[in-house]
């Protein structure tokens, strides 16, 4: 984080103490919220077993990680049972035709997978008491594992999710007769329209207070904080006027203040019949100056449909530099 001299803001501005980051954020490091909406926080002080939830982690991890965990678990649990069967001995099984150790291992391994999944092709069978006991226990764990996996898959599919994309950058540029801080959001799934969409934007700034540096948080006043339906894109605008914590701050002041925006969007999804939300953040390095977003929708050739060009969500143009300080 930047630790240069920080310009003192308007003392009449009321900070927002309801962000959850505390009222004296002097010991933070890095960004507060990651781009994907997760909080950049690591918790310590109690055992990992009490802090970590396998269920919630499996529900929230990316799809490729979820599938990878399922595959690794399947091969690993069967490898474990195969080693147990090998310790028991091949004499506890019948129907084996392999003549080499490696092929015997493969036969036992695939017997384990058939038992775990309750497929049971039938050529290799346990005949000893120990092998039958282990096979019975493996079949039980297989049933339970598939029940858990089915529940996780259902939970991931049924979990309400806001299919909202944010622009990679926020921009500061002309807006009406003043400057404004702007970024864009868009609903990117076909036939996915959120209703009663509300947005809240907070900003964290490093400030000097009685010789001590600490972060203060402010809720930004927006040109529009809600829309009835989000079927296209929405350019979120914060006018930089005398009521803004960014008023009269230069680019250097914003850099030294370690600016970070915290964005929360929520709306009602009639498919899930539930409220969904998305979070993201923008640091100073992700705010571009003297830029303006380009339109990202157009009329179809037959004039009957509006085309939303999602690939233009992050496109902007240079605008004339505003030289004088706003008054």
Image (cartoon, rainbow, N blue to C red):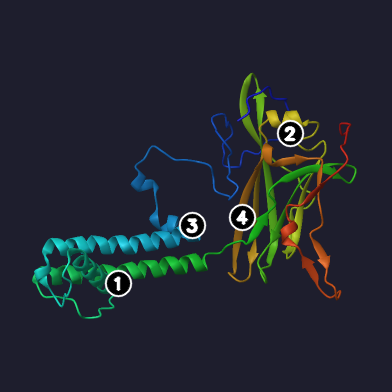
Looking at the image, tell me whether mark 3 or mark 4 is earlier in sequence order: 3
Looking at the image, tell me whether mark 2 or mark 1 is earlier in sequence order: 2
Looking at the image, tell me whether mark 1 or mark 3 is earlier in sequence order: 3
Q: CA distance from mark 1 to mark 3?
A: 24 Å
Badge 2 element: loop
Badge 4 element: strand
The residue identified by callout 3 is 60
Query: Residue 225's x, y, as percent?
Result: 74, 53
Query: Residue 16's x, y, as percent?
Result: 65, 39
Where residue 13 is drawn, which disc sits there?
A: 2
Q: CA distance from mark 3 to mark 2?
A: 38 Å
Position of residue 217 relative to residue 310, above or below, is above
Residue placed furthest toward the front: 99
Which residue is more in the foreground, 105 or 20? 105
The residue identified by callout 1 is 143
Query: Residue 111's x, y, as percent?
Result: 23, 72
The residue identified by callout 4 is 278
* Residues at circles 1 and 4 in contact by the CB criterion of under 8 Å: no
């Amino acid at each position: 984080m930047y630790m240069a001299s920080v310009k003192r803001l308007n003392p009449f501005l009321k900070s927002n103490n309801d962000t959850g980051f505390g009222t004296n954020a002097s010991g933070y490091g890095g960004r507060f919220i990651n781009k994907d909406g997760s909080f950049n926080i690591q918790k310590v002080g109690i055992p990992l077993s009490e802090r970590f939830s396998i269920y919630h982690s499996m529900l929230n991890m990316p799809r490729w990680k979820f599938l990878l965990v399922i595959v690794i678990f399947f091969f690993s649990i069967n490898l474990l049972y195969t080693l147990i069967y090998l310790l028991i001995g091949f004499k506890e099984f019948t129907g084996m035709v392999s003549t080499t150790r490696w092929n015997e291992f493969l036969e036992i391994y695939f017997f384990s997978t058939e038992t775990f999944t309750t497929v049971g092709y039938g050529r290799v069978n346990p005949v000893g008491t120990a092998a039958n006991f282990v096979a019975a226990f493996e079949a039980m764990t297989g049933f339970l594992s598939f029940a858990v996996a089915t529940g996780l898959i259902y939970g991931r599919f049924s979990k309400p999710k806001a299919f909202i994309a944010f622009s990679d950058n926020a921009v500061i540029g002309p807006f009406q007769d003043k400057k404004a801080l702007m970024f864009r959001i868009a609903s990117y799934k076909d036939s996915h329209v959120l209703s009663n969409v509300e947005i809240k934007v907070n900003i964290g700034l490093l400030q000097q207070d009685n010789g001590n540096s600490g972060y203060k948080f402010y809720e930004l006043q927006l040109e529009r904080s809600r829309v009835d339906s989000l079927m296209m894109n929405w350019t979120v605008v914060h006018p930089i006027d005398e009521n803004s914590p960014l008023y009269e701050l230069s680019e250097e002041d914003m850099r030294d203040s370690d600016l970070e925006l915290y964005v929360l969007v929520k709306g009602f999804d009639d498919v899930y019949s539930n409220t969904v939300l998305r979070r993201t953040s923008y640091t100073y390095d992700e705010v571009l100056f003297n830029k303006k977003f380009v339109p990202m929708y157009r009329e179809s050739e037959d004039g009957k449909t509006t085309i939303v060009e999602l690939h233009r969500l992050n496109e902007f143009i240079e605008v004339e530099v505003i030289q004088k300080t706003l008054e």
